[in-house]
Image (cartoon, rainbow, N blue to C red):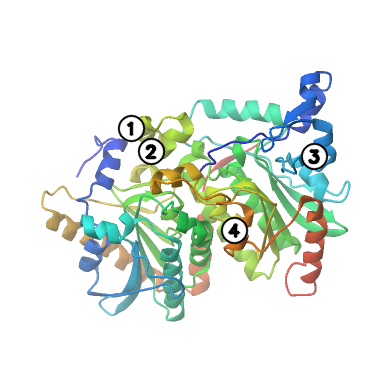
Amino acid sequence: MSNTKITAWEKVEIARNPKRPTALDYIEQIFDEFIELHGDRAFKDDKAICCGLGKIGTQNFTIIAEQKGRSTKENIERNFGMPNPESYRKAIRFMKQAEKFKRPVITFVDTKGAYPGLGAEERGQGEAIAKSMFEMAKLKVPIIVVVIGEGSSGGALALGVGNKVFMLENAIYSILSPEGFSSILWKDSSRAKEAAEKMKLTAKDLYEFKVIDKIIKEPKVEEKEDFIKKVSKNIKKEITLCISEMNEKTSEEIVEERYQKFRNMGEYKIL
Amino acid sequence: MIVDKIKKREPSAKNKTSNIDIPVGKWIKCDKCKEIVYKDDVRENLSICPNCGHYFRMHINRRLKMILDEDTYKKFDINIDTNNPLEIEEYPKKLKALREKTGLQEAVACGTGKINGEEVVICVMDSGFMMGSMGVVVGEKITYAIEQAIALKLPLIIFCVSGGARMQEGIISLMQMAKTTAALTKLDEAGGLYISVLTDPTYGGVTASFASLGDIVLAEPGAMIGFAGQRVIEQTIGESLPEGFQTAEFLLEHGFIDKIVERKDLKETLYKLIQYHKGGSGNV
C-alpha cells in the first residue's frame, strides 16, 4: 500500500484507533500456540503487560506484550495498556527465564505510556522502567521488538531494547504523546496536530534515524480479520528470518550487537 | 516528563559578578519561606536558605567545588553539540542564549576529581540549563563518563537534576535513556561502584534510567523525585496529591533510595562509601 499521503497526525489517529488490532490479536496468529503466564511474584499480576510462552514450529519463544483492551471492560482490566511498575517487573521475570532456558524474547510495544498514578510512583515506576531496560541491555538471548501501535515515552522504551526493532507502517514511536509534547514545548496541548508533524514519530522517520531496523507493511483491507492475518504473516516472516540469523551467533555476539546498536543512538557534531 | 513547577534557582556564578553593583541583585527570595535573603549568606551556607533551611539548586561549578578537593577537577575532553534532529528553529538559538547566560556548554559536566584524595569520575547536571533535560549531548557525555569509569577503574558519581528527556530532540532524547542504561550494564559487569545522588528535581526519563540504577542511591533532603510530573498525575487520577508525595523522604519510606544526606555531609558520606568498596575486583 502506498501511504505517502497519510500525514503524521493521521498515523497518530490510526495507531490510537480503539479498533486497531492489539498484541494478543497478532500473537494468536503468529505463534502455533501461546500459554499466558502471570504475576511479578512480588505484588500482583498487572494486566497491561501480558507474558507467556509460544512457539513457531520447534522454536520456543518468551513473549512479552503491552496489551490494550479490546472492549471497554477489558480496557479497564488492562488499564488501557498503561503499565504499572509490577508489569515491568513481571516482564523482567520472564526475560530472566528466557535467558535461563535459552529462548529468544519477542516484545510487542503498544502503550500511551507508563501509568502516571499515585500507586505507580509509590512503587517506583521510574526504577521499574530503568531496570527493565537494564536487563534487556545485557540479556544473553536475542530480543526482537515489534512496535504495533502507540509507542509512547519511557513506558514503551522499557520493552524496546532489542537486537532488532521492527515497526508497523502506521505505528508511532515517540518521546511523549503529541499532546504532551505541545503542552511542554508550546504550553498549549491543543496544538497536538502540529506537534505530530514536528516530532518525527512515523516509522519512516524512525527508520531514517536508525532507531528502528525495519518497517513492516500494513495491507489496505477493510476486514479486521484479514488485516490481522496479513500483518501477522508479515511479522512472522520477519521474526523467523531474524531468529534463524541470530541462532548462528554466540551469546556474546548477541549482547555486543545489541549494545552497539544503542550505544550509537543519536548523531551529534563534534565542536 | 517535565517538572511542573520551576522553582527559583541559585544565580549562576557568572551572574554573581555582573550583578555585583546592583543592590537588587544582592538579594534572593526563598521559594519555601518567601523570605528575602542576602545572596552571600545563601552562598556561604552551601546554597541553603539561612532562614528556613530550604535547599537552593546549585550551579555545576559550585557543586564541583563543594564535593571535590581543590583544583582536582579535570573535565573530559568531549565537546559535542546536537544536530537539532527535529529541526526546531528556535532550539539552537535557545542553546546559544543559555550558554552565554550560564557559562555552561550543556546540562551536564563530566570529568575526574578527588574526594579527600580518592579519585573518582564525576558527572554533575544543572537545572539552569534547559531544566537539566537529557538530549544527545547529555546522553553521550554520561555514557562517555561511564566508559571512562570502567577504563580508569574509578568509582562513578552522578549528581542528578533533570526534568527528564529533552523534548526538542524527540525520540533521540528518549533513546539516550537506553544508551546510558546499557553503558551501566558494562560498569556493573566490571564490578564498578556507581553512586547516584538525586537532587531537586529529578524526573521523567532521567529517573527512569541512570538516576535509579546506582549501586547506592542517595538524595538531598526535600528533593522532588519521580517519574510522572505532579500535574499529570493529578489530571489522571482526578484528585490532589498527599503532602510530601514524591519527596526524597517519601522515596526513602517506599524503599527507592538508600539514604538522605544533608548537603554539608555529602562529601564525607561519599568518601566513606568509597572506602567500603575498596579491594574488590572492580573500580575502587
From the image, state whether disc 4 or disc 1 is nearer to you. 4
Q: Amino acid at mark 4?
A: Leu
Q: Are marks 3 and 2 on the same chain?
A: no
Question: Is the C-beta separation of discs 4 and 1 under 8 Å?
Answer: no
Q: Secondary structure at mark 2?
A: helix
Q: Are there few (<14), some (14-19), or many (20+) residues within 10 Å of tag 2?
A: many
Q: Position of residue B242 (x, y in %)?
A: 52, 50
Q: Position of residue B144 (x, y in %)?
A: 66, 52
Q: Amino acid at mark 2?
A: Pro
Report how far apart the C-alphas of labels 1 and 2 lie in the structure: 7 Å
From the image, state whether disc 3 or disc 2 is nearer to you. 3
Q: Earlier in the sequence, mark 1 or mark 2?
A: 2
**Image quadrant occupied by the C terminus of chain B:** bottom right
Q: Chain of mark 1?
A: A
Q: Earlier in the sequence, mark 3 or mark 4?
A: 3
Q: Are marks 4 and 1 on the same chain?
A: no
